Amino acid sequence: MEFKDHVCELLNTIDVCQVFFDITVNFDLTKNYLDLVVTYTTLMMLLSRIEERKAIIGLYNYAHEMTHGSSDREYPRLGQMIVDYENPLKKMMEEFVPHGKSLSDALVSLQMVYPRRNLSADQWRNAQLLSLISAPSTMLNPAQSDTMPCEYLSLDAMEKWIVFGFILCHAALNSDPAALSLWKLALQSSSCLCLFRDEVFHIHKAAEDLFVNIRGYNKRVNDIRECKESALSHAGSMHRERRKFLRSALKELATVLADQPGLLGPKALFVFMALSFARDEIIWLLRHADNIQKKSTDDFIDKHIAELIFYMEELRAHVRKYGPVMQRYYVQYLSGFDAVVLNELVQNLSVCPEDESIIMSSFVNTMTSLSVKQVEDGEVFDFRGMRLDWFRLQAYTSVSKASLGLADHRELGKMMNTIIFHTKMVDSLVEMLVETSDLSIFCFYSRAFEKMFQQCLELPSQSRYSISFPLLCTHFMSCTHELCPEEVSRTDLESVQQAPRGAQMSDSLHRRHHIGDRSLSLCNMFLDEMAKQARNLITDICTEQCTLSDQLLPKHCAKTISQAVNKKSKKQTGKKGEPEREKPGVESMRKNRLLVTNLDKLHTALSELCFSINYVPNMMVWEHTFTPREYLTSHLEIRFTKSIVGMTMYNQATQEIAKPSELLTSVRAYMTVLQSIENYVQIDITRVFNNVLLQQTQHLDSHGEPTITSLYTNWYLETLLRQVSNGHIAYFPAMKAFVNLPTENELTFNAEEYSDISEMRSLSELLGPYGMKFLSESLMWHISSQVAELKKLVVDNVEVLTQMRTSFDKPDHMAALFKRLSSVDSVLKRMTIIGVILSFRSLAQEALRDVLSCHIPFLVSSVEDFKDHIPRETDMKVAMNVYELSSAAGLPCEIDPALVVALSSQKSENISPEEEYKIACLLMVFVAVSMPTLASNVMSQYSPAIEGHCNNIHCLAKAINQIAAALFTIHKGSIEDRLKEFLALASSSLLKIGQETDKTTTRNRESVYLLLDMIVQESPFLTMDLLESCFPYVLLRNAYHAVYKQSVSSSA
């Protein structure tokens, strides 16, 4: 009500004063007058669209009565207004009859501006509009116009002025041909106008409904119908062609200004014109695409809209970046040219009252005092006072009885309008950008906004402009309106945020929060989708590269070698007509430049999208900083993690897994592609590698998912080593690999292809020191469980073993005691399993050492030197720390620190340390006295070819040495003494079988003898001299001779 009263009072005052309106002269006065009329009209129309308005004001009055004890005194008037404005335009047409002259004069003044703005794309093109390079000789000349502020005036605003204005003062349409021309041109350009945000006004239907009931307006009604048909038929295509022209014009403008930013000074007007034109076309499309039934939908679906928005953002960025350049130019312009010209105009005025003279003189003085030094010193300029004074001066000089009439001094008005534009170039660049290029209306068309974004991503040629959608989200906070009290300023928001805890946020803040939250969610969604799209393209490229890399694997060359051999021997193999397999590299041979492969398309699409992601380092949306590159980085990390695990091709049901070497090849191919991303986007791909690959060296990744470390550890323990324990696989020391043995049930995998030197090195490359440490710890856990079982067997035989320990020089007594032992085979089998696990670990450690020696040779050599020079008298804790460091580098140690840690955890609380030590000693005794039974096993035959036994008993050497070293380190015993004791018992027991006559029990006696040599060779604590004292070397020599002879005869 108060707003309505103030508007009516102001309009009456303007009519009484007979104010002169001309948009080209008193621009600010005329623009604000027309804005006032449109705002008033819009408000009344919006009020009439509230369905429950009568109930709402009734509730308001009731609440007022409850609060204040009486009704609101304005309530009757408010109720009457609601009733009167049921049909707001009809009521306002009556209301505006007295204001018709002023309003029509203001509207008719648009005839010099609106038709010039509402031209077709062909006319723009012929005039070479917005082109800086069409006339190179005038490139440095300042862009001038008699109507500077009108050049970038919103077309949308002018159409609202014309349509609503001439509906309210419709009599002018019958009396003034210029008014009718403007009216028809506006009706032909649009089908609907924006009332407020996403609320629209359908022009033709509303105008026709109003005029059809007015006598003598049949001709106007026919005009409206013709214009409606014209708008539906031609407006869409006309605006489509405009957008097409503006895309190329803005691209040219942005490119030239990026190369020569100094042109922003003289050609600033072109920039703001371009932004305003583009903004109007985008808003027109957005409004009409959602609200109009179209004859041709193609005109209202613009898949290239992102490109236009992008060039707008580029121009905005140039203005923000080179603002000081523009300031320097226009400060000099104002002081060196504008002040001089204005001073001359003032001097030449025939009549100039004192008040007006003072104001004009202040303008001249303000401009004259400006200097470039102020810009260089970073001084903040503020010309708002000067612009307000000019607004007041327009009001003083536009009334009918003014001494100095602006209508008679048009040159002064035009010059001042130009000066006001120049001042805005110095202190109001940000406000100018909002005025000419604000697209915050997208906030209220979120569905159309998202649809445009999806269309942009789907079209490869447009994906490079997709960043324009997140950038638009930075506009949203400027869509608040001063007539909406719930959209408070940021300072009000901060005051609420600083309020004490428990203070409730008022409803007035929710609307602003809603806009802010929508801008954040949309920006986040757009950047996330862009990163996902880039990630999917990168994944497709990686898949292609992995396929090409796979073609180079050694396994694929077998067929080529076979064909070459057969060709040489002139053998015909294969069926006739069988297509020849393409060799790797064929895909790089191009017969035609026009031939485009799938990989080419993927790279092109990726480079386009990455341009967009890399366009800005970060953006601010509602005081939140978004970094597009981080979205891509995080998506690449997640996908790389999933891809590495996926490329292992682990199948839990069939226990199949990729060979480490093949996985390494694929990972390297993947990493090569990811490294190439740095050519497109400024991201640290090494950080991605570090984050992902380091997580893969742990048991679980950061999301709690299994890694390649856990998959390969489980596979080697549960599949490969389990089959070794079952006798299907043997460890061949000569090949340093595990090899399948011929069995009835063939295994689904070839052990050698997973355990030879190259595969173990590949495994070490993939898992790294951390992963190999986890593998070692898992192996040691299995060993510790076997040792626990062995200790139980020792406890069961503790009395017999105690006697045997002291009776090794009494053969008969030893034989009798041996017969009382139980679970002899179990002890040997468990020790063999331990030996197999330790042999596998030694392969893994050796591979790790080789890999680290390539990557960090100096560090590895330093660690090795440190380990080799530990003094014998060093404290065991210190020595174990050195051994732990050495073991992490893959170096072999006298005492295995991982095994010591694993066995240390077995100490039971119920057994004293002395008892534990005794059990450890007796375990060695048990193994020593059990060794002769191995001679009766058929599989115990030594094979010189593999330098071992098919039943893996050669692994006992490693098991005995490592277990003894670990156990007696834990129990602080002498490792050397205990191993000497073991050697004495073992040699005594083995010498005894030399006297046996039973061929069954001695069938592989010589092969078992060799175990003693292996134990000594393996041990850092035993020597051949010591063995010679216990076991005659001649027997070892004869044993080697026998097994080699037997091997030759069996192979023959």
Image (cartoon, helix red, strand yellow):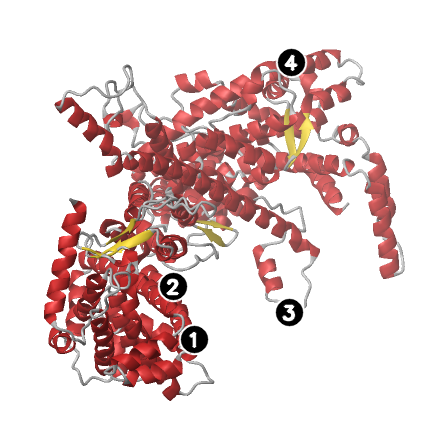
Q: Quadrant of residue 931?
A: bottom left
Q: Which residue is mark 3?
A: 501
Say left or right for 188 vs 703. right
Q: CA distance from mark 4 to mark 2?
A: 81 Å
Mark whose residue sits in front, 3 or 1: 1
Picture quarter with the C terminus: top left
Q: Which residue is mark 1?
A: 792
Asked if residue 168 can be seen in this view, the reply is yes
**Element type at mark 2:** helix
Which numbered disc, 2 or 1, marks the residue that appears first in the sequence? 2
| Amino acid type, label 2 | Ser
Mark whose residue sits in front, 2 or 3: 2
Q: CA distance from mark 3 to mark 1?
A: 66 Å
Which numbered disc, 2 or 3, marks the residue that appears first in the sequence? 3
Q: CA distance from mark 2 to mark 3?
A: 53 Å
Q: Which residue is mark 4?
A: 229
Q: Position of residue 239 (x, y in %)?
A: 52, 21
Q: CA distance from mark 2 to mark 1?
A: 22 Å
Mark whose residue sits in front, 2 or 1: 1
Q: Which residue is mark 2?
A: 778
| Amino acid type, label 4 | Glu
| Amino acid type, label 1 | Lys
Which numbered disc, 4 or 3, marks the residue that appears first in the sequence? 4
Say left or right for 863 vs 369. left
Q: Position of residue 876 (x, y in %)?
A: 26, 82
Which residue corresponds to the image point at 59% horizontal and 66% vertical from the top-left?
498
- Label 1 neighbour load within 10 Å: few <14, some 14-19, many 20+: some
Which numbered disc, 4 or 2, marks the residue that appears first in the sequence? 4
